[in-house]
Amino acid sequence: MIPTQFEYLAPTSVDEALAALAEHGDDAKVIAGGQSLLPVLRMRLNAPEVVIDLAGIDALHGVRDDGDAIVIGAMTTHHDVLHDPLVAEHAALLAKAEEHLADAQVRHRGTFGGALAHADPAGDLGAPALALGAEFVIAGSGGRRTVAAGDFFVDLFETAIAEGELLVEIRIPKHTGWGAHYEKFVRVAHQWPIVAVAAAVKSEGGTITEARVGLTNMGSTPLRATAVEEALAGQPATEDAVRAAAAKAADGTNPPSDLNGQADYRKHLAGVLTRRAVLAAAGA
């Protein structure tokens, strides 16, 4: 199908984009890479009168070092995040997840911030961002505010971004030297994950000193497997120790049941994938 007619705006600054949002309100939709919005428009599931394109705002592109964190502009493409040396050095888990996100065409067009703002619980970036303790910088008419990852994902396709606000950048605390792995289970290549696990592990002398584990598609939002993290601390990076901790992966989760698998199946998968992800991240 062809989208309904709309007015197209291409602001060149965040202030200009916010002004357009304020002027048009509910009649406007923001487009980043377009990988989520364009299919909706083509199927006429949404028919905005105005589309505000953020691609021309240079300040929203790129990755920079900011002391104890790296900062990723919301309009930075998945391809650029995947291949950025700062990400590889200080937030390797993001690069591991980006490797599995869709295909090369989508990675060249889709944006890091757009995917996170879309908040699909089956999206590949929410769990890694949550595991790494990301902070989301949101701009509005009253200025900018920072929201922790645990508060950013509110519910299914719902975030802390309020009406008239824009996600402008994501701050990722540095996890330099941590091992990382993203384990994704799909039936066919490039599919949304049935379940996936993001694991970042800090180890010394064969002992896990700290672990951060995020779960994809195990609830209406990305989740932290805190029981696993607590069980791993101080344990040797061995098959038996990691298996015992990974058995707690589904604790407190509420996975969906659909054509790809029932909730119990997903809970089993979570344990299996967590064991694989943690062992790979620990280099065991």
Image (cartoon, rainbow, N blue to C red):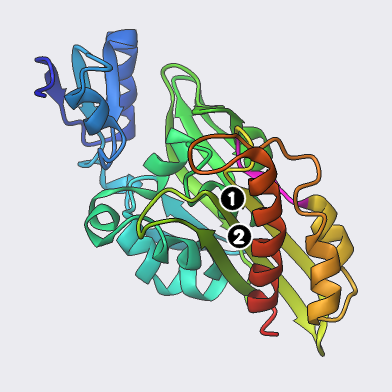
Please tell me which residue lies in front, 86 or 213.
213
Asked which secondary structure carries label 2, the reply is strand
Asked which secondary structure carries label 1, the reply is helix
Q: Is residue 102 above or below residue 28?
A: below
Relative placement, left or right, of 67 versus 106 is right
Relative placement, left or right, of 74 versus 271 is left
Residue 9 position, x and y percent, is 16, 25
Residue 278 position, x and y percent, is 69, 70
Q: Amino acid at mark 2?
A: Ala
Quadrant housing residue 115:
top left
Residue in the image at 79% along x and 40% along y: 252
Earlier in the chain: of badge 2 and badge 1, it is 1
Q: Is residue 4 above or below residue 55?
A: above
Residue in the image at 70% along x and 35% along y: 254
Q: Amino acid at mark 1?
A: Ala
Residue carrying label 2 = 198
Q: CA distance from mark 2 to mark 1?
A: 6 Å
Relative placement, left or right, of 224 versus 140 is right
Magenta span of residues: 221-225
Give the total of numbered labels.
Answer: 2
Image disc number at residue 157: none
Q: Is residue 240 visible?
A: yes
Residue in the image at 52% along x and 48% along y: 194
The quarter of the rendered structure image containing the C terminus is bottom right
- The answer to whether the residues at label 2 and label 1 have Cβ atoms under 8 Å apart is yes
Residue in the image at 81% along x and 59% along y: 247
Relative placement, left or right, of 166 versus 57 is right
Image disc number at residue 127: 1
State whether the magenta stretch is mostly helix, strand or loop.
loop
